[in-house]
Amino acid sequence: MNAQQLLEALKKVQEPKGCYFNADQAMTLALLESLLVNKQRLGYMACPCRLANGEFEADRDIVCPCEYRKADMAEFGACFCGLYVTKEWNEGKRERVYVPERRPVERILG
């Protein structure tokens, strides 16, 4: 599977939930490619914008879509990576601001 195929497959599942892919196709495809690399390297699609531990249980919260996505999108219109966004964010109807890391420090440091 390549990034374009992953995009098409995930769109069908995520868009009905109100989770759209960032309209910046180059960035979106690069992030999806990184998810595929993590899948090959780790066995699961860990968030490409965070440092994975390499152990699924330790990384469960950052397996894409991460458990922080819903709160990030509700507050900022985009997830931490900017891979998933709201329709309003894509249409420029929401201010595009920095999305801070929600993952607790103790999870980051292991």
Image (tube, rainbow, N blue to C red):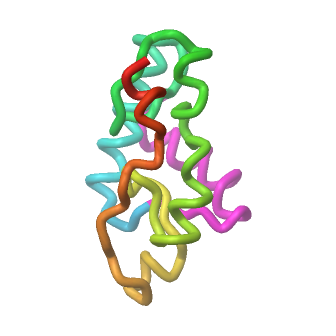
- Give residue 75's position: percent from left, percent from top: 52, 71
Determine whether 9 is above or below 95 in the image.
Answer: above
Q: Residue at x 48, y 20 (%)?
A: 39
Residue 48: image quadrant is top left
Residue 18 falls inside the magenta stretch: yes
* Part of the protein shown in magenta: 1-21
Q: How many labels does the image show?
A: 0
Q: Nearer the viewer, residue 86 or 103?
A: 103
Q: Is residue 36 left or right of residue 70?
A: left
Q: Which of 85 and 66 is in front in this view?
A: 66
Q: Residue at x 61, y 43 (%)?
A: 67
Determine whether 54 is above or below 39 in the image.
Answer: above
Which residue occupies the extreme bottom position in the image? 93
- Give residue 88's position: percent from left, percent from top: 50, 82
- Give residue 52's position: percent from left, percent from top: 40, 22
Determine whether 6 is above or below 96 in the image.
Answer: above
